[in-house]
């Protein structure tokens, strides 16, 4: 008789990531890089669509741009924090002016890492893995 030790299916779970960015090429590049690392990746192209997807599906991590049409990243993240207090978020932006209104808004969002575009593949992977290692619950 074969014996298979009992183990939690949690360890077999594929991390789910939502990439919210109005630049489709960015979402495609992030999808390619992160799926090659074993993550399941879905995309949204503005904050409103991102919120809608989050309300319908659990995700382990949200990667979001800041400047987007319809609903920007700061507004979406503020709403996410209200609805899903433990959500893990990574901000990606091409904004470089530290004094800009957008960056001031980003700096008011507590404990959210920010990566500047263009993003090196290895830096993206490291940031995502670090955030995913911080906890285990999906939103």
Image (cartoon, rainbow, N blue to C red):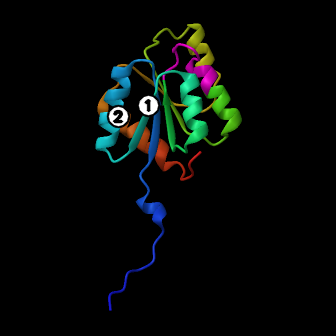
Q: In this figure, which residue is indicated by the disc labeled 1?
A: 43
Instruction: Give the residues drawn in magenta, as a range.
Output: 65-76
Q: Quadrant of residue 94?
A: top left
The numbered mark at residue 25 is: none
x and y percent of residue 20 in the render?
48, 27
Where does the C terminus fall, quadrant-wise?
Answer: top right
- Circles 2 and 1, Cβ within 8 Å, touching? The answer is yes
Q: Quadrant of residue 39?
A: top left
Q: Nearer the viewer, residue 82 or 108?
A: 82
Where does the N terminus fall, quadrant-wise?
Answer: bottom left
x and y percent of residue 56 in the render?
58, 40
Q: Nearer the viewer, residue 110 or 22?
A: 22
Q: Secondary structure at mark 1?
A: strand
x and y percent of residue 104 in the render?
61, 14
Q: In this figure, which residue is indicated by the disc labeled 2?
A: 31
Q: Is residue 74 magenta?
A: yes
Identify the residue at image location x=42%, y=39%: 128
Identify the residue at image location x=44%, y=48%: 15
């Amino acid at each position: 008789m074969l014996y298979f030790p009992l183990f939690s299916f949690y360890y077999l779970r594929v991390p789910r990531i939502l990439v919210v960015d109005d630049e489709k090429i960015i979402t495609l590049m992030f999808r390619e890089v992160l799926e090659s690392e074993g993550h399941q990746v879905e995309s949204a192209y503005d904050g409103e669509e991102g919120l809608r997807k989050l309300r319908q599906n659990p995700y382990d991590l949200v990667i979001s741009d800041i400047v987007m049409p319809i609903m920007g990243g700061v507004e979406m993240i503020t709403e996410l924090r209200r609805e899903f207090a433990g959500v893990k978020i990574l901000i990606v932006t091409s904004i470089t002016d530290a004094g800009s209104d957008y960056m001031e808004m980003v700096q008011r969002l507590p404990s959210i890492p920010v990566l500047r575009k263009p993003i090196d593949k290895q830096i993206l992977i490291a940031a995502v893995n670090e955030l995913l290692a911080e906890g285990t619950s999906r939103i």
